[in-house]
Every structure is written in C-alpha cells, then in structure tokens.
Image (cartoon, coloured by chain):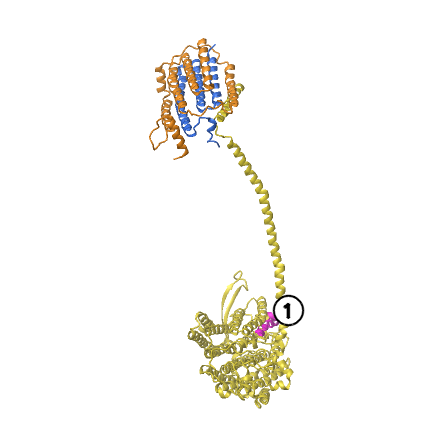
Chain colours: A yellow, B orange, C blue
Amino acid sequence: MTWIVRNLWLIPALPMLAAGLGALAKQRHRRFAASLSIGAMGLSLLLSLCAFAHALKPGPNPRQVFNFDWFQMGDPGAPGTVVKLGWVLDPLTAVMLVMVSFVGLLIFIYSVGYMARDENFTRFFCFLSLFAGAMLGVVIANSLLLFFICWELVGLTSYLLIGFWYHKPAAAAAAKKAFITTRIGDVLFLLGMVWLYSQTGTLLFYDGSGGGCLEQSALDALVVRTTGAGMAVSTGIGLLILCGAIGKSGQVPLHVWLPDAMEGPTPVSALIHAATMVAAGVFLVARVYPLMAAHPAGAAAGTGALEAVTWVGSITAVFAASIAVAQTDIKRILAYSTVSQLGYMMMGLGVGGVAVGMFHLITHAFFKSLLFLGAGSVIHGCHEQQDIRRMGGLRKFMPVTFATYAIGMLALSGVPLLFSGFWSKDEILHAARGWNISQAPFYLGAIGALLTAFYMTRQVALVFFGSNRGGGRESAPSPPEAMPHATPEPARLHEEHGSPHESPAIMTIPLIVLAAFSILLGFIGTPAWPWFQSFLNGESASVNFARFSQAGVLPLMLFSTLIVFLGLGLGWWFYGRKPIRRSDEPDPLALLRPDIFALLRNGYFIDELYEHTVVAFNAWWSRACAWLDRWVWNGAVELVSYAVIGLSWVNRFCDEYIVNLGFDEGCRRLTLGGKFLSSLQNGRVQNYLRVIGVALAALVLFLIWGCRAS
Amino acid sequence: MTLSFAIIASVTVAAAVAAMGLRNIVHCALALTVALAGLAAAYLQLDAQFVGFAQILVYVGAVAILVVFAILLTRSGDPAHPSVLSPGWLAGAVIAVVVLGVLVYPIARSPSISRTLPPPAGATVHQIGDALMGRFVLPLEVTGLLLTVALIGAVIIAMREKEPIGTISNPGSEIANRKSQIANPP
Amino acid sequence: MSPLPGYLLLSAFLFAIGLGGALMRRNAILVLIGVELMLNAANLNFIAFWRFGAHPEALTGILFVIFSIGVAAAEAAVGLALIIAIYRHYKTTNVDEMTALKG
C-alpha cells in the first residue's frame, strides 16, 4: 500500500477544507478566498498527478484499494453488518482525477477574472471549492455509498451555483428544476443501491479479497437470479443505476434541467455542466460497467443494461442536436450540445466499453469547457449580451477568443486529424458499426455528427462573422417572437462601452491552455497509438500505423470526415454566405420550414408536456394531501380535543356540584356545630355554677348507685 | 348537747338564709358574720377549739370585714334593682333543692353513721403544731406560698391605676373623675 | 345514737343555702358570700367526721380545715379584689352584665 493510495482522500479533502474556510471569510476578503480555492485545487492537481504517475507504473495489480469500516449495525461477525467505505486507484480513477483537477483549476483561474465585479465573489469560490471536493470524492469512491454521498453533494452544489444569483426568479426556478429533476433519477439510483446491497451484502466495488460487488463472485450470483419479467437481477440493478446517470447527465427524458441551468454564471456552466458534473453520470456507468455488462451465460454479449445505455445515449444524441439547431442564446446552444455529446458518451459506453466512452468524455471536457469559457468571454466582452442575433463580427474585436473558440468548435464538430473530437467520436462510431444487435445507433450517431457540425457553424458564423449587430443595451426589449428561455445575466457594475472588447489575460490564458489540450489529447487515442484505451484496459500500447489498414478503420474515417464537411458546408451555406444584417431578421431556417423550426426552438415542447402532466399531478396531489391533512387528520385531532374538553367539563361538573357541595355542606355543618358549642359559654358565671351544681348532683348519684351496686 | 346543738344550728341556718335573702347587702354581710360565728360555736362544741377560734379570727375577723369593705367600695349611687334575684333564679332554686336532696339522701340512708358516741378526742395546740411541722409541713409551706401570692395578687388587682394628678379627696369627685377617665381613655 | 347525722344535715343545709344563694342572687359579692358559706359547710363536715369518725388522733380533719380556712381566706381576698377591679371598670356589680368572656 503506497503512500498515495492511502492518502488518496486528500485530493477531495483539500478543496472541501478550502470551502469550509472560505465560508468563514467575509465578502471583502476576495483575494483570500480566491487564493485559498486556487491553492487547494493546485495541491489536488499535484496529488492527482502523483496518483496518475503511480497508476502508470506497470505492476501486477493495476487496481489498488484502501477500505475501512465506517460503522457497524447489529452483531459483529455477522455478514453484511459492517458498512465499509474506501477509495480506489485504478487507471479510470487516475485519468478522471487529472482531468477534473486540471480543468477545474483552469476554470477557477478564469473565474477570478469573470466574477471580478460581482459582490458575492467569496461565496462563489466557496461553492466552487465545495463542488470540486465533492466531484473528486465521486471519482475516488470505492463504495457505492460513498459515491452516492458525494453524488448528492455534487447535486447540492450544482443547485447552489445555478441559483447563485438567487434574487433573479429565473435563476432560483432553474436551480429548483435542476435539483428536482436529478432527484427523480437519484431516487431510482438509491433503489438500485438498496437492491444491490440486499443481494450481495456489500456496497464496496472492489474488496482486497474478491468480495466486492463488482467482482466476479458477486456478479456471477447476480446474473443467475432473476426477477420480474425474466430479467436478471444484475440487469435490473443496472437499469436503476442507469436512471441515476440519466438524471445527472441530462439524457432524455430528464434532460430538461440542463438548458435552464445556464442561468448560472458561465464558469459554473463550464465546470459543472460541461466538464465534470454531467460527466459524473457517464463516469458512474463506466465505474459499474462490470455490473452493466454482466449477462447470463448463453445470451449474447452486450445484452442487459448495456443495451438500454446504448439506446438512451443514441436517441439523446440526435434529439438534443436537433434542438440546438434552432436556439438563439449562445449558452443554450452549448447546453444542448452538451446533452447531445453526453448521449454520444453513453452510446460509446454501451457499444464499445469503458475506454471508448471515457476517451470522448475526457476530450469533450476540454473542448466543451473551452467553448463555454469562450462564450463567457464573448458575453463579458459584449456587456452581458447573450443573444447571438445581437452579436456578429466579433473576430475583429476579440481575436484570441475567436481563435480559441474556433479550435473548440472544430474539435466538437470532429474535423479530422488535428482535433481530438474527431478521434474520440470516430472511436464511438467505429464501435457502433461493430455492434451486433443493431446498426441504428450508428446511423443515429452519424446524423448527430452532421447536426453538430451544422449548428456549431451556425453559431460561429452568427457570433464571429458578419457585421456587428449589437446596437442596444441589454435593457432593450426582446423581439416580438419572444424567446421563452433566454434571459441576460443581471446587470453588474460595468462601465458603458460602445463596442465589444477582448477579455483580460486572466480569462484568455485558460482558453489558450484548453485549446492546446483540445488538439493534443487527440493524439493519445488514435488507432495508430491507442495509448488511452490500452491504459484503461490495463494493457500496454505501441505505435503502429499499420492499424489504420485494419478492417473498417479507414473507410469509417473517410465517412465521418464526409459527414463533418457536409455539415460545415450546410452551415456556411445558410449562415456564412449571406449573414443576417439586423438582429430582428428571421432565421434562414425559419424561412425554410417555420413549423419545424418552431418545434425545435421550443425543445419539442417537452417542458410544456411535463408541466401539464407531472407538475400538474404533483400540484393536485399536494392539494389532496392538504385536504386530507386539514379534514381527516386535523379532524381526528380535533375530535380528540373535543373529547378531552367534554371530559374536563364533566369533571368540573362533578367537582363543583358533587364534591364541593358535599364538602361545603360538611364544613358548614361543622361550623354550625362549633358555633353552637361556643354559644354554650355565654360568659355568665351563674350559668357555669348551675352546670357545676347539676354535675355535682349527678356525680353523687352515680357514686351512690355505684356503691349500692357493689 | 342536743339542745345547744339545736340552738346553734337554727341560729346558723337562719343567719345563712338571711345572708342570702336580705335586700340590703350590708345586712347580708352582717348576717354572714353571725352565721360564721354560729359555725365557730359548732366547732367548739365538737371539741375542735383551735379551729373554732381560728374560725373567729380568720373568718369573722378578716373575711367578713373584707366583705364589708368590698361592699362599701362597690357601692353605686344607682337606684337598687327592683328584683334582687337574677333572671335564672328558678333553675338555681331547683338545682339547690336537688343538691340538698342528693346530699341528704345518703346521710339518711347510711347505716355507718348511726353508731355509739366515741370518747372525746383531744386536739391540743401542741399536737396540732407537731402535725403541722411534721406530717403536714409541705402543705404548710405551700399554703404560705399561696397566701403570699394571693396577697400580692389582690393588691395588684385592686390597685388603682396611676393618675397624673394627685390623690382623690372625696368619693363624689372620685366618681366624676372615674367617669371622665372612662369617657376619654388615656 | 351519735350526733353525727345532725351535724351532717346542718352541713348539707348550709351547703344548699349557700349554693342557692350563689345561683339566685344578682350581686357578685353575694355570690362570693354564698361560696364562703359552701366552704364553711364543708369545713363543718370535716370537723364532724374527725370528731365522730375513725382515728381522731391523726388530726386529719382539723388540719384539713386549718388549711381550708387559709385557702378560703386567700380566695376571698383575691375574689373581692377582682370584684373591686371589675366594679371600677363596669360601674356595676351585676353578674349578668359581666359577660365579656363569652365564647
């Protein structure tokens, strides 16, 4: 057990400590809060690099765990009564750690510039550090319980950060929507967790001795038992856990919160809703992959929960890409793009395994956060303007932003050879082509790639090319076709500039770094040198260009290149050739087919559907419960209280008329008797003497009679 | 014997009746004196000479005089009440008769007192003195104490309250002074 | 026939007269006089029994009467002093008007 494995907990603990200390800082201690968070994140990055270096070393056991007992229920010694937690260091953990801490550090540095004018600077960094700590905890967790704890923490910090400007009603509503929607997924995740615990008696992924729930003995047991509809238990648990991933990663049907989450500040969108938190869902599926992939002996490989993963992912990829085509808020386009790319990752996991999905996750983290930070730079430079119809021609005003944004856009679209997105997406398409259950995900993926290239070109053309259409301030009224979702970020203290301007260096340097990685990362996953995939699978890789000539590799590369250029060309045709002049001109696509365009604009009206079904049902249910509470439970309580009052009335009646009367009468008689006796003494001496005389006579008679009797 | 006894008895009873029945209180006191003297004679007849003379000395010589003094001191100028009897006099008479009957009944019916005359006993002063100092020394001392206490007590009870002005000159002004004292309590 | 019953009867009569007078008269001093008569009747009773009873050499009767006379004298003194004091307060010697000690 090396030092780094035993102290892996430091990696999430340091940012959480920074969050705790930052919570105590006052609003004016900005430099303290920022340096605390950035320092903690830097230390975590260093430790992650140490862990990565350790994982790189070849050894007999690529996976090392450190487990400890948390608490005990019931008798010691009985199985399943000790709740254990722990952390694991394997290649999957190592790459995620490095990615999260590195991207996180860059975004932290960016936020110093972006939030410089916000008065809640310290609170922002406190929440950011808390998020980073929670996410890193998710990455290293070896126990599904610890995973879930950190998962919930991540959801909490997402809520806090989306609703950072809580006085804006739209932001508060978006935060609530995010939390509640992911909660639905989390409930099902919890059910899966409980089921798994009941079936295997442990929630540890990997035990040192083969007893973990992802190890072969447990999986064999789970696969054999069946539950309702003849489904294997492992499949059932896998589906439930998948629901948690669906909620957190914004897959259909729980995707509705991600576009609204753009109400948060742009660094938040970059960090949480592009690179890390939404990736946590994908990471979850990757982590419990052995469980998902377990299938009964005799069934084909790829059945079980993995099939559901693939279908969900591929449908989402196309669904979200189509909606992104018709959006006008710069961040919303990127949000739907994220949903679509997450679908790709899920699809990759389903058809190709952990390495394929994770490769796309890592590359996507870099170029999507680059795109979001670039969008933040654009918004910052255009004085909080977010509508792309009001931008245009920004490449003259913001060259660095334009260059880095273009690199990100090309990576996302999958322009071949130079950009990482091409290599990772190609892996996915290659694996989908080889899926022996159906070819539909392959075609859906291809359509999605086309749409991705198209809408990204549209966005870049409208934002950076053409003439600048940003005339009015953000307080100008929206155009008549009211945008239902986009709201500009609140006006901050910002001197009025007439024209857009480039962002300061503290914001552009992270962009440059991310852009570099967007290019370089591609080269570690090409078929010629599949270092990344081999690393995750525990093998070693060598450079071999001959792999290009393996079956299906080169034709597929050509096919995807074709698709990408088709998309780029269409985009340029509609938006680059004759860019729109004024901000209230209708979109060229809207002119073509207005009804489809309106459908896409409104996200297939999914939000309205939910509002009229789920939300309405919830409101009805709460009304029914309120009625129940008021009339039934309250009525019962009131009945009891009336009964008690009645009892007390009877008691008082008895007391007043029966007890008191009897008692009072007795006392009155006693007083009268006393008065009578006292009246015998009337102060007259002769009376007393008479009585004495009578007593004397009586006494003498008594004595005489007594003597006579004797 | 019998004759002297009869005379003494009748004088004593008559004097007693008079003492209780006369209207004028002073006459009652004087009748009491006679009754006490008659009783002294009875004692002498009973060979208790010391007691007889003690009776005369103490009762006739002191108590009766004391009663007369008290009568004189408590004389009021108010007209005498029409009736000398108190309101419950009938009950008192009945009780007295009953008590008489109860006392006479055992005397009449008791067989032990009809015996022969025993020889006369001698009770010299010497013997009485011996007995007082011997067997009865404790009652003697207690009686001494009692007399002392009674003396002091009677003086204190009957003492006139202190007045700022000097002594009284005549009973008339004493009554006026007393009335004024009661009207304005100090 | 001893003269004892005669003396006893005399004593009884005196006692009854004293009692009746004490009960029937209005004046407080007369009540006291009645009490004195009763005491003397009892003394006579003692002397008579001493003379005609057993053990006359013990002188019990005489000594009892001596003490009785002494006590009676003391009691008469105190009682009359009380009557004088009451008279000073109430200006009357009517026992029916001395009812302040009623219960």
Please state the horizontal and vertical placement of residue A139, each as a whole percent of the image. Answer: 51, 74
For mark 1, name the chain.
A
Residue B103 sits inside the magenta stretch: no
Nearest to the observer: residue A156 or residue C19: C19
- Amino acid beneath label 1: Thr
Nearest to the observer: residue A280 or residue B8: B8
Question: Does residue B137 lie above or below A649 as drawn?
Answer: above
Q: Residue furthest left?
A: B166
Residue A279: tell me if it is visible: no
Q: Main secondary structure of the magenta part?
A: helix
Q: Residue furthest bottom?
A: A577
Residue A444: tell me if it is visible: yes
Nearest to the observer: residue A123 or residue A515: A123
Question: Does residue B104 lie above or below B183 as drawn?
Answer: above
Please state the horizontal and vertical placement of residue A193, each as a whole percent of the image. Answer: 57, 69
Please state the horizontal and vertical placement of residue A29, each as a whole percent of the image. Answer: 42, 73
Number of dots carrying numbers: 1
Q: Residue furthest right?
A: A229
At label 1, counting other C-alpha atoms closer than 10 Å, the crowd grade (few under 14, some 14-19, many 20 or more) is: few
Question: Does residue B28 lie above or below A543 as drawn?
Answer: above
Please state the horizontal and vertical placement of residue A328, each as a whole percent of the image. Answer: 57, 82
Q: Quadrant of residue A453?
A: bottom right
* Image point (59%, 42%), residue name: A658
Q: Quadrant of residue A317?
A: bottom right
Which residue is label 1 attached to? A227
Q: Secondary structure at mark 1?
A: loop
Q: Which residues are magenta?
A: A221-247
